[in-house]
Amino acid sequence: MNIKINGEKVQTNLSTILAIQAAFYPEIKTPVRILNGFQTSENLEITEGDELFFIEKGKFPKQEEFEAMLSARHTPHVYEKVKQGRVAIAGLGGLGSNIAILLARTGIGHLHLVDFDVVEPSNLNRQQYKIRHLGMHKTEAMKAELQEINPFVTVEIDTVRVTQENARELFADDDIICEAFDTPEAKALLINEIAGHFPQKKIVSGSGMAGYESSNLIQTKKSIGNLYLCGDGVTNAKVGRGLMAPRVAICAGHEANMILRLLLGQETV
Amino acid sequence: MVMVNGQATPQAVGQTIAHFLASNGFDLSRVAVEYNGEIVSKDSYAQQYLANGDVLEVVTFVGGG
């Protein structure tokens, strides 16, 4: 039968994980074994078309095997689709920095990051930057982070403030746009410009994730046009109620998962 | 009768979108509006009058991200 082992097409009559490992990778002492995206220690039966990976635990893989290994943990047929995906992220604060990392880990092929600002100490309470990024543009800092997480993602950056004048041009090539701004005015401006002029584009937006109200108030809802709204819809950041890492990350997770669903053709929430 | 965010709103009939929003506590700089299934640009809020049978959906964004 024909299967794939560590990204290579192989023909074999061996029919179990352990038999195949003994034949092809006998030198691996502490193996991580992955069958069709699922790590297992059981000696499962192999069938036609299966994808197997054997990795020495904790070792850095050979360069040519690296992308195949990164993708090994993805559900088969998902990785191929998301690798073709292109997503714009407008705003790289608490929402956008988390969403960018989630999408890079998921293997989205092309990310378009847009932000005008630099990393400040006050960002570190919830945004995915580090002390060494202070003073850098968020676009540059996040691009560097993503390269360390998944070097096979193409990252395009625009270090610019989104305005009524430039919004349409900036996002003209992006079919899915993630709104991850901070102020309600910036959120409304982007939605109005994009949804008003490109009704076919899909927008995933965050609204209402401040404080430490219940996690379960945060939801993903289909809103007007092609707009998907994530958040509780009401809990704004204000004096005495700041933005905190857990709830911002929950909302970012909602946005990232909705984007993943859209890339895989699922348009329901 | 105009349906606004799913609520029957008879007093909206005859008002422009801009006037209705402003007099009902909506901040125009923080909303996106769908009028009879289409998202309308801010420029047309002041021109578009609401009539019987119209459906208005108003999304209000809150701060934080």
Image (spheres, coloured by chain):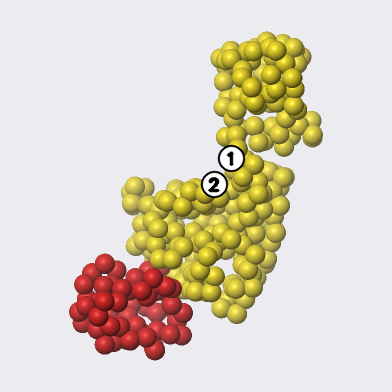
Query: Which residue is tagged 2?
Result: A264
Task: State whether residue B14 is above or below residue A232.
Answer: below
Residue B17 appears anywhere in the view:
yes
Quarter assignment of residue A4: top right
Q: What residue lies at 79% left-to-right and 30% top-to-bottom?
A: A62
Query: Which residue is tagged 1?
Result: A78
Task: State whether residue A268 is above or below residue A14.
Answer: below
Crowd class of label 2 (few under 14; some 14 to 19; many from 20; radius 10 Å): some
Q: Are marks 1 and 2 in contact (CB under 8 Å)?
A: yes
Q: Amino acid at mark 1?
A: Val
**Position of residue B51 measured from the top left corner of the image (x, y, whole percent):** 28, 83
Task: State whether residue B20 is above or below residue A149.
Answer: below
Viewer-proximal residue, B16 or A103? Answer: B16
**Position of residue B64 measured from the top left corner of the image (x, y, whole percent):** 45, 62
Task: Give left or right: position of A268 versus A213.
Answer: right
Task: Give left or right: position of B3 versus A237.
Answer: left
Q: What residue lies at 45% left-to-right and 62% top-to-bottom?
A: A227
Report the chain shown in yellow: A
Q: Are marks 1 and 2 on the same chain?
A: yes
Q: Quadrant of the N terminus of chain A?
A: top right
**Position of residue A81 measured from the top left corner of the image (x, y, whole percent):** 62, 45
Q: What residue lies at 25% left-to-right and 80% top-to-bottom?
A: B52
**Position of residue A264 measured from the top left corner of the image (x, y, whole percent):** 54, 47
Task: Give left or right: position of A45 versus A248.
Answer: right
The chain carrying label 1 is A
Task: State whether residue A75 is above or below residue A206.
Answer: above
Report the chain shown in red: B
Q: Amino acid at mark 2?
A: Leu
Residue A256 appears anywhere in the view:
no
Q: Can you tell which mark lies on residue A235? A: none
Disc 1 is placed on an element classified as helix
